[in-house]
Image (spheres, rainbow, N blue to C red):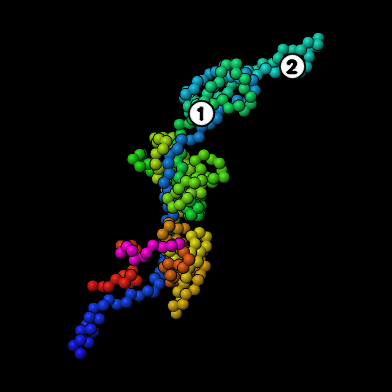
Amino acid sequence: MGEHAGAATEAGGDLPPTASMEEPLVAATVGTVRNDLALTGQVMPDEPVTVRSTQAGTISRVLASEGQAVSAGTELYVVRVETEATQPNEDGSMPAPTVRFFTIAAPAAGVLTGFEVLPNQEVQVGAETGSVQPATFHVDAPLTAQEQYRLTTQPTDAQVQIPGGPAPFTCTGLQVLQPSTGASGGATGVEGATGVSTATARCQVPAEVRVFSGLAADMTIGGGVAENVLTLPTTAVLGSADTGRVVRIGADGAQEEVQVELGLTDGQTIEIRSGLADGEQVLQFVPGGEPLDDPCADPMAPTYDPMLCGEVAP
């Protein structure tokens, strides 16, 4: 009987200890947050510039042809404008009509397309008589609402890398186009890296950089750097822009929900501008936040905790 009980006790001693299910904590610490927004976009040709007649009259001469390369200001055609006199001569006769000639020039540099005007053709003011396709390009990258929140300021340029192309270059004139702008290449219904986009980040490729329409482009927008600031993992904060909430743990272990002011974020770490002090502990995974992956699924993940996940030390 005693031997049997002893065997049971010995066997029970080999059982692993019960895993602790306490919620993991994290402390607010001083660090640096670099808000570099990485987007995937595409090289696109700039929109064609419409050629319009500035006069109502008859085309007297055509000076260019379809497919011709032109510079801004290149003469394209001449409009003959004939104006009837409204006052008679002293002898009562009507003077001859006044005839003037106006030259219509290319509004931009590029290649003439849709240019099919003919001599003696009548044109009206504002009539479209072709377009100029510039030999310039821009990069469009879909931008989600969450990514827009990360742009606390409006940068004026971005860094672009063309896989298999030239060295990284500065893409200038950065702007964020909303669907309501009506610009071509808008973001409505376009899938971004983190969800359905609501806008488009667009910047201009420098003329000296050789690119082609349709090339993939990696765009990096520098949204600022915050050094020596209080930080937390984004998993510990409910909210990602302006204000958020954390669950602070008091000295007695009591939980308290605290509102904090938020600053820059890199998607993993977020700046805490006010509401917490250095070293204060909060729940690592705030209740009500976005669904999180299983922290025990990957032993190499930074959130993996051997005690939490029931791992027994050898």
Location of residue 100 with respect to 301 vertically, above or below: above
Tell me where residue 183 appears, x and y as whole percent: 53, 40
* Tags 2 and 1 touching, CB below 8 Å: no
Single out the residue that lies furthest toward the left: 3
Location of residue 11 with respect to 2 vertically, above or below: above
Tell me where residue 312 appears, x and y as whole percent: 27, 73
Please, what is the dominant secondary structure of the magenta stretch?
A: loop
Tell me where residue 121 appears, x and y as whole percent: 60, 18
Quarter occupied by residue 101: top right
Q: Quadrant of the C terminus?
A: bottom left
Single out the residue that lies furthest toward the front: 1
| Residue 231 on the magenta span | no
Give the SS element for disc 2.
loop
Single out the residue that lies furthest toward the right: 91
Give the SS element for disc 1.
strand
Residue at image location 34% in from the left, 66% down from the top: 296
Q: Which residue is mark 1?
A: 132
In the drawing, does residue 102 fall left or right of residue 69? right
Label ID, residue 85: 2
Quarter occupied by residue 15: bottom left
Q: Earlier in the sequence, mark 2 or mark 1?
A: 2
Instruction: Tell me the magenta residue range.
Output: 290-299
